[in-house]
Image: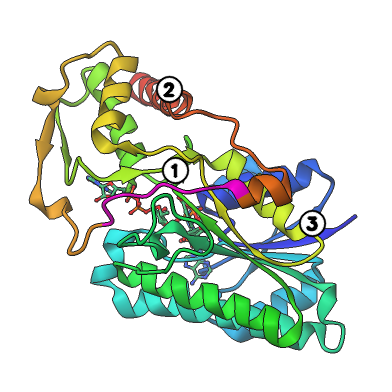
Amino acid sequence: MPTALITGITGQDGLYLAELLLGKGYDVYGLIRGQNNPKRALVEKEVPGVKLLTGDITDLSSVMRALNVSQPDEVYNLGAISFVAYSWENAHLTTQVTGNAVLNMLEAIRLYAGTDIGKVRFYQASSSEMFGKVQDVPQRESTLLWPRSPYGVAKVYGHYMTINYRESYGMHASSGILFNHESPRRGPEFVTRKVTQAVARISLGLQDQISLGNLDAKRDWGFAGDYVDAMWRMTQAPEGDDYVVATGETHSIRELLDLSFARVGIEDWDKHVYIDPQFFRPAEVDLLIGDPAKAKEKLGWEPTVTFPELVNMMVDSDVAQQSAQAGA
Ligand code: NAP
Ligand code: F7E
């Protein structure tokens, strides 16, 4: 039975990946930070088969300890400060967690594996935010990186460090350049979930308005359950490599609003949406659209959930959740 160690186990992707790997018969360990992480109960409830180890990816000794205890065949580094807006307000911390800690992970694996560098396969959660001010449309693996936020800059560092460990030490290390992916487990600070939660509450008469920033930004949104499957396929490939994981379609926040409100029978959403300048970013990423041709050809990966299906799934889940809370 293969063994996997996942950092970022309490996050959206950590939960989906743990489910996927447990379903395949893996022994799954998750690194959880803090002496009393409030999301521990969620992990224990949703993926009870996961064995939790305390640690922080900025703390090399805790990562070494987790490797020694779990003895993993595969390590998935999903831990990060992942909210782009927050990264301007906490740029140094974001650099340490989202950027420098990738080096900790790689170095810990190198030290742990010793002369048998091939015994651990590594996945790094890179991001389409690295494309920032996009230099190609659509974006692919060869597109010049031009990050537009401290988060994006930190991810570029992690991406190149992953490539460097592959080239320097022959490590099986892959960098997944994942475009935005969402689900009912998405954090409520991200725009999709913020919208679907608010739409659910508006439809139930629990609130009247939602405050948003730039409605013209466009994103290539897919379903998180599909994207963790791409991560796993990368660690199964004969060699480590870099892959764009995307749907190849792009939609604006306005289209997200159209579909979300339509799902609850509201066609004219203008009166419910308030533009608040606090949600505009110092530098915006205007357009993201990925070309997943390499992932399709080399990994046999394809998205299975369309954008309207994703929005409906999230709105329906939030309506059920909000109704249950209101009734409780
Ligand atoms: P998420 O829900 O924000 O989860 C982030 C995870 O990182 C949480 O489990 C968090 O744990 C953990 N973490 C934060 N600081 C840590 C530290 N110092 N040590 C250890 N763990 C730490 O993010 P996600 O959407 O699942 O994304 C997973 C990864 O993919 C992230 O690296 C993200 O940047 C990247 N990514 C995401 C997308 C997307 O659209 N979702 C796209 C491209 C790349 P706590 O509970 O302790 O805070
Ligand atoms: O913003 C606009 C905002 O915060 C999307 C992370 O998972 O994906 C995510 O980063 C767009 C931006 O995601 C609001 O300006 C308008 O243009 O949902 P988001 P993100 O910044 O694209 C990438 C791939 C990652 O790697 C990240 O970890 O929506 N927008 N109004 C808003 N965004 C938010 N959050 N809130 C608003 O009120």
Secondary structure category for the residue under label 3:
helix
**Mark pair 3, 1: CA separation:** 26 Å
Q: Which residue is mark 3?
A: 236
Sequence-wise first label, 3 or 1: 1
Q: Position of residue 293 (x, y in %)?
A: 60, 47
Q: Residue at x 33, y 80 (%)?
A: 92
Q: Say which of marks 2 and 3 sits in front.
A: 3
Within 10 Å of the Cα at label 2, are there few (<14), some (14-19), or many (20+) other Cα atoms? some
Q: Which residue is mark 1?
A: 186
Identify which residue, 288 or 81, lies in the foreground.
288
Q: Do the numbered discs 2 and 3 sit on residues whose CB atoms are within 8 Å? A: no
Q: Position of residue 202 (x, y in %)?
A: 22, 22
Q: Is mark 1 within 8 Å of ligand 1?
A: yes
Part of the protein shown in magenta: 285-293
Tell me if residue 115 can be seen: yes
Within 10 Å of the Cα at label 1, are there few (<14), some (14-19), or many (20+) other Cα atoms? some
Please state which amino acid type lies under the numbered disc 2: Asn
Q: Examine the residues drawn in magenta and state their main secondary structure.
A: loop
**Mark pair 2, 3: CA separation:** 32 Å
Sequence-wise first label, 2 or 3: 3
Q: Which residue is mark 2?
A: 312
Q: Do the numbered discs 3 and 1 sit on residues whose CB atoms are within 8 Å? A: no
Is residue 37 on the magenta stretch? no
Q: Is mark 2 within 8 Å of ligand 2?
A: no
Is residue 286 on the magenta stretch? yes
**Mark pair 1, 2: CA separation:** 14 Å
